[in-house]
Image: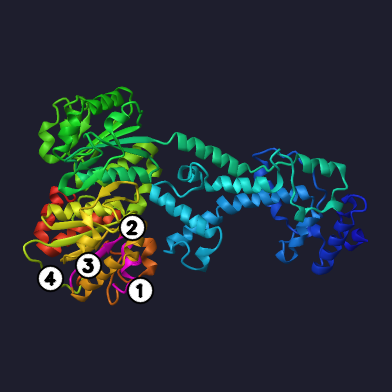
Amino acid sequence: MVLEAGDLRAPSFPTNNWYRLRRSLEIIKSSGSPPSTFQLPYDSFKAQFDSDVPDNSQDIGEIQEGRSKDLDYEFACFFLSSPRLDLYRSIDLRCEDMLSGADGILAEAKWLLDIGLLPNSNSATRAIGYRQGMEYLLKCREQGVESMTLNLIMIHPKRHAQEKVVDFIYDAYNDERGTVNVPESLRMKKDVSSHREAAELKAYRTKNRKLFSISASASTMGSHAKKALVPVADGTEPMEAVITIDVLRRAGTDVTVASVEKELKVDACHGVKIVADSLINDCTQTVFDLISLPGGMPGAATLRDCKELKDMVEKQAADGRFYAAICAAPAVALGSWGLLKGLQATCYPSFMEQLPSSASAVESRVQQDGKVVTSRGPGTAMEYSVALVEQLYGKQKADEVAGPLLMRPNHGDEYVIRELNPMPWTFTDSPQILVPIADGSEEMEAVITIDVLRRAKAKVVVASVGDKLEIVASRKVKLVADTLLDEAAKSSYDLIVLPGGLGGAQAFAASEKLVELLKKQRESNKPYGAICASPALVLEPHGLLKGKKATAFPPMCNKLSDPSEIENRVVIDGNLITSRGPGTSVEFALAIVEKFFGHEKAIEVAKTMLFVHP
């Protein structure tokens, strides 16, 4: 009867398998077509993966000739008309594709983040799987690794999300002895009337080809991540150190920040305090793929005089591994150690004469020669750092890292700011500027703003929004604030300016004290500003952009009520200044200098840093 109704697979059913016969008739009656005319989703997975992994399972029977129809999920029960082994395998492969396929949960979670949504912020981002995927991708970005399934093990080394997915698939059908263990609710005992099918079920193992191979690759990748050393000292130029650390970590590099002083905390130039990961003595037995020396004086001289560091860099050169230096360090350290012999090199202009005669001095913003990379100063530090990424990983990776930084395409040219509704920014004696920081603040944006403003002789107060002075920034750089926000709030300021970074911006938005200060600043018609995520996540939700033009980090711009000026790198609207991201931070800070001190002073600072051509 079933055969006459149109199901040509009926003779292949086990004898007296009334369940399958009945289900086939139900499908024919409901849809007008026999089950074999529908395209099983498993078929596409099977075709995709069978070429990679041999499949020893038997054919499930002849499929009716003719054009297949797309499966109408109104008849989802059709799956049960196939051998249960194929059903299980289909579930396995579908779970893999749901996680890491081109249109999988991670791809969709990335899209939700890119349009400016945050986990658990609406019904879509609260959905099971999407919220976890978004949180994972945000963690990737904070850690400076790629937003890829491949890196899950690097984020959660003990019990990462992918293992849980694999365990779920495996544990659903296999007991601890590795034998099949179908949940009671899924058992259809009448089906297993075939000895061959029963044997196949008992021997079945999830094949998780994609997930297990990715996990293995991730384990390998995690254990062989590129390692870099960035030594720091009292008097190190903070922009050159922090930008290098941040950019390398964005590329997935395992960066160790090592103090050559007796303590982990170093007092860098311009009053910036950095806490290193370790002391240099604890790093001497580690093999690094790259050692990069920041400049700044007397920091570069202290690096030069550190015997442990000298021995490490000399061995680095002898072993043919990468080493690099910026600003004063090429001449003061590498040159004095004899490690620039026969090489083209550059450095800060006032140190060019100190380059050894055995080196060929050039005035490039970044110079690569063999295994050595050198650069000129704070204003070239981002270009230098991306060049280091290229040396370690190649051009494609360097481009991937550079894109979200929003770097200028015309390095060295004068910057451009967009100003609307001009008004003077006034101060008494010297501008009093508050720069809040918090766990998750973007370290480049914070340090560049502080560094540039202090170079211009503004009085900058760095205030921690948390309950302690030390914060851990988005790329795990540890910074120490001058004071806590509660104490800083007792004073008035000519400007309050917020760095970005997702975690930091969220902390700012949740701080009643900081929001109150910002509202009072606006009400007093005093300047205030923000960069990257903070315009969208702090200023906009609290009504601090009402009637104002602003810009922000591109994926956050959809949160701005007025997006008409978002393509500009820096936007000033009366007493408000906003900017886009790490690569616009110097322009952002220089625009503040220009508003307080004038264009001539801003250009002077920019040339000193080599941000624009001297």
Q: Mark 2 points at which residue?
A: 504
* Secondary-structure class at tag 3: strand
Q: Where does the image place residue 484, in percent across and percent down from the top left?
A: 24, 57
Q: Is disc 4 in contact with disc 3, using a CB cutoff of under 8 Å?
A: no
Q: How far apart are marks 4 and 3 (CA)?
A: 13 Å
Q: Mark 1 points at which residue?
A: 561
Q: Name the residue under label 4.
A: 424
Q: Is disc 3 in contact with disc 2, using a CB cutoff of under 8 Å?
A: no
Label number found at residue 598: none
* Secondary-structure class at tag 4: loop
Q: Name the residue under label 3.
A: 528
* Secondary-structure class at tag 1: loop
Question: What's the amino acid at mark 4?
Answer: Pro
Please give the range of residues in magenta: 526-544
Q: Is residue 494 rendered to the left or right of residue 241? A: left
* Secondary-structure class at tag 2: helix
Q: Distance between the residues labelled 2 and 4?
A: 30 Å
Q: Earlier in the sequence, mark 4 or mark 3?
A: 4
Tag in front: 4 or 3 = 3
- Classify 10 Å Cα crowding around label 1: few (below 14), some (14-19), many (20 and above): some
